Amino acid sequence: MVERDLFGSDISEITGLEPGGIGKTMIIDRLSHHTEILQTVSHFITYVKIGWGLPFVMNKTILLQRLNDIKAMGLGVSNGGTFLETCSMKGKFEKGLKSIIEAGFTHIEVSEGLYELTRREKKMAMEMAMSSNIKLIMEVGKKGKENQLSLIDTIYKIQETMDYSPDTIILEGRENGRDVGIYDHEGNIKWDWVEKILETVKLESLMFEAPLEKQQTDLITRLGRGVNLGNVQISSAASLTAQRFGLAGEGLFINEQARECNGSPATKFVYHVIRNAISADQTSLMNITGLNRRTVQNAISDLIEMKLIKEVYDPRDMRRKTYSCLNHG
């Protein structure tokens, strides 16, 4: 991602956070938006996915111009995985890969949402991506409600996908974010799934497709501003970045949950994370907040002194201390 000065010199003083360290954002592009709109929010985007097989039903000249316009903003651009699934189904997988590379895409997305690929095909994608200096993105999950993977199968697929050394592993969330992967029929996140999945793969290697703004907010609140989010609408890109910096909605440092905390912005942020975290130790607090070790240690000391959190040893590892709120049941 191209380095950009998003907020000027005051952001660190206001929030206690450095401008860097936010997660990747993937925008879903249905060709219904002009590139001028992308330009206005390009600061907040890592790459754009032109979904399904849309790039290959376009006039070639128009497609190449759109790709060039997107890349000129410093953004990556990928195909939608369904295109290569269709190519595989028709015995044209290698030809499909070559067409992506020749068109000038910076990312290749490989998925199995509708059709299973062979190991040979996935290895071919890995090798062609490496030789062409293109980033390989691999997606885990099924699109159809009737053939969703179980949690165990999801974890197995993630482990299998790691063999191909992708730049990012995406968890399928479709365009509606309901009845798929980590989401229930109302679009709520199944946090027990997320916890188990994150025991298998590092957070920075994973991208959650999160088409609904509530899902984006919840994932940032629980996992921190470094969480990678995909299938984001262009219209949500700016507000999503504000969420990452705790400047909007549930991410506000001074919110209903943290009003009892009278510490610095950094201390309030650490308190907010401990209240919402799946598990909170010093390392996870540093990773989630983006704060350095000394700042996190000072915040923990302040919160213990204010009797807002408690410190206990992890029974599975007595060298590790975890933190939780005293007023939680």
Image: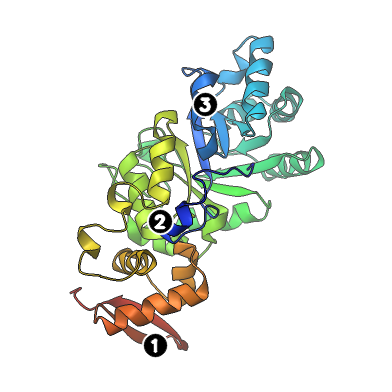
Name the front one of labels 1 and 2.
Answer: 2
Please name the amino acid that badge 3 sits on: Leu
Quarter of the view holding residue 186:
top left
In the rendered image, residue 71, in percent from the top left (x then y), is placed at: 66, 29
User: Please, is residue 211 above or below residue 39 in the view?
Assistant: below
- Label 2: state its secondary structure: helix
Q: Residue 28 or 316: which is nearer the viewer? A: 28
Question: As shown in the figure, which amino acid type bears the numbered disc 1?
Answer: Pro
How far apart marks 1 and 3 lie (CA) works out to: 49 Å
Q: In what quadrant of the picture does the C terminus appear?
A: bottom left
Along the viewing direction, whichever of 92 and 75 lies nearer the viewer: 75
For the point 42% across and 41% down, the residue is 173
Among numbered discs 1 and 2, the one appearing first in the sequence: 2
Q: Nearer the viewer, residue 34 or 142?
A: 34
- Residue at 25% x, 64% y: name it: 258
Point out the frontmost of discs 2 and 3: 2
Specify the amino acid type for callout 2. Ile
| Residue 113 visible here | no
The residue furthest bottom is: 318
Compared to 313, does 60 lie above or below? Answer: above
Quick check: marks 1 and 3 in contact, CB under 8 Å?
Answer: no
Mark 1 = which residue? 315
- Tell me where residue 79 appears, x and y as whole percent: 60, 29
The crowd level at tag 2 (other Cα within 10 Å; few <14, some 14-19, many 20+) is few
Q: Which residue is mark 3?
A: 38
Q: State yes or no: discs 1 and 2 in contact (Cβ < 8 Å).
A: no
Q: Position of residue 8 (x, y in %)?
A: 51, 46
The local crowd at label 3, few if under 14, some if 14 to 19, many if 20 or more residues have their Cα within 10 Å, is many
Report which residue position mark 2 lands on: 14
Check the image and report above or below for 296 versus 236: below
